Structure formats: C-alpha cells, structure tokens
Image: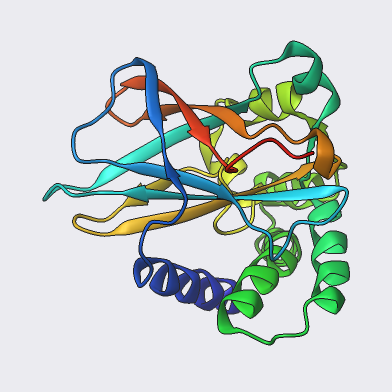
Amino acid sequence: MKILILVILSSLIFSCASYQSGSYADIVSGEHPDDTPITGYIDKTYTTNYYTLLQFTFGNGSPDWKRVKTVSLDFGSEELNKKVKVTLGKDLEFWAESIKHKITVDQFNTQVFLGSIAAAGTMVAISGTQNGSSSNLKAGALTYTTSLSIDAANDFSNIKDNVERANILPSGHLYKPFAIPAGLITKRWLLLEIEEEKMPHEIYISVTWKNEKQARYKIQVANKPFE
C-alpha cells in the first residue's frame, strides 16, 4: 500500500505544477461554483486509432477546498453513449502495458500515469487479503472487469458506496471522487474505446459537487471534428 500512496502523491504534485490546458468548459445548466474553471482536451500522446484519452483540469481560484463527488460523461447522443466504452479495471492495465511500448520518450508524468493504473487493482486486492476486508477483496476483484458503455460507466460512477468506488479506480481517473486545493488545480483523465474518426469534437460532462450543486458542461476537446 505504501507504493500506491507514493504513486498517488507523486501524481498530485505533478498535477499541481501544471497550468490548465485545453478548452474551457461552457456551463449548459445547473449551478457552478465560483472561481472553478474546467478545461478538457484530447491527449494525442496516448490516443491511437481505437482509443482516445481525454485529459481534464479542474481549477480552484478560491481560498477554500472544492470537492467533487461524481463526474459523468455524455456525448449528447444516445447511440454513441451505448456504443462507446469507458475502459476500466484490468483492461486499463493491459492498455497501459501496450501503450508503454508505443511511447519512446521516458517522461516522469508517463511513469506516474502508467504506474498508478497498474498498481491500483493489485495493491487493493493485496490489502484486502492481508487485513481480511471483504470490501477490499470485492474492490480488488472488480478491477478485473472489462470495459463498460458510457451509460453503464456513468451508473457505476454514481453507486452509493463511494469508498469502494474510490478503491476500484486508479489515481487520477475522472470517475474517482477528488478534491481541488485552494489556489491550485487537479488533473483527471478518462480512456474511451472509440475509433478516432468517430470521436466528436465536443463532449458533455456532468459534475456533482460536495455541496450538492450539480452542473452540466460542454467542452470542445478538439479544434474540429475528426475527418
């Protein structure tokens, strides 16, 4: 578990050192907290013909912590929401191992990102075995599930047992509850299984904040639709 904690802390430190990248989100509906800009973009470093990695940054210009309970993704199309999959569990580890071979530049953020995915499921399962926790054992087992459609993944993100959900998802995942320190930013990511030419240039996300405020946002993640 110490290894996992170090990976998570390293990821947070690196995130806080970065500026917000990508396009700023437009508020479509709901209540949005003040001084909390959100940006998003397609990360070409990790995107291939059949997988798209979305990167998000959540800023906090206020003197207080901002906390996010749930986030869900929406393409604005019922058909796409059912067809496109959010990669979770063991499949994330397999993907991370494969994309690692594709990337030749050995950067610090790459090591942290890939390591956090690979370590999450294994460390949770080991922890559950050692302390006899049935919740941890269940969480560890669920890391071996396959990908889910966007609709199913959104349902998964909204399950009541937030502690168990937090254990299942690796560090930095968009669907894992998180907090934004005062005056800093937090980076999140999401891997989608979708052919590059079918990836929309605009997406929607819905955010539930800890104070129960909810808002829906539209983000232009690419300058133009893929052709």
What residue is at 30 percent from the left and 42 percent from the top? 37
95 left or right of 179 in image: right
Asked if 204 appears above or below 1 in the picture, the reply is: above
Specify the color scheme. Answer: rainbow
> What x and y, as percent, mark residue 214?
37, 20
Which quarter of the figure is the N terminus placed in?
bottom right
Judging depth in this view, the residue of 167 and 89 nearest the camera is 89
Based on the displayed image, in which of its 4 quarters is residue 212 positioned?
A: top left
Q: Residue furthest left?
A: 63
Judging depth in this view, the residue of 54 and 212 nearest the camera is 54
3 left or right of 192 in image: left
> What x and y, as percent, mark residue 157?
60, 31
> What x and y, as percent, mark residue 88?
76, 46
Asked if 46 appears above or below 51 in the picture, the reply is: below
Asked if 110 appears above or below 44 in the picture, the reply is: below
Based on the displayed image, in which of its 4 quarters is residue 80 positioned?
A: top right
Which quarter of the figure is the C terminus placed in?
top right
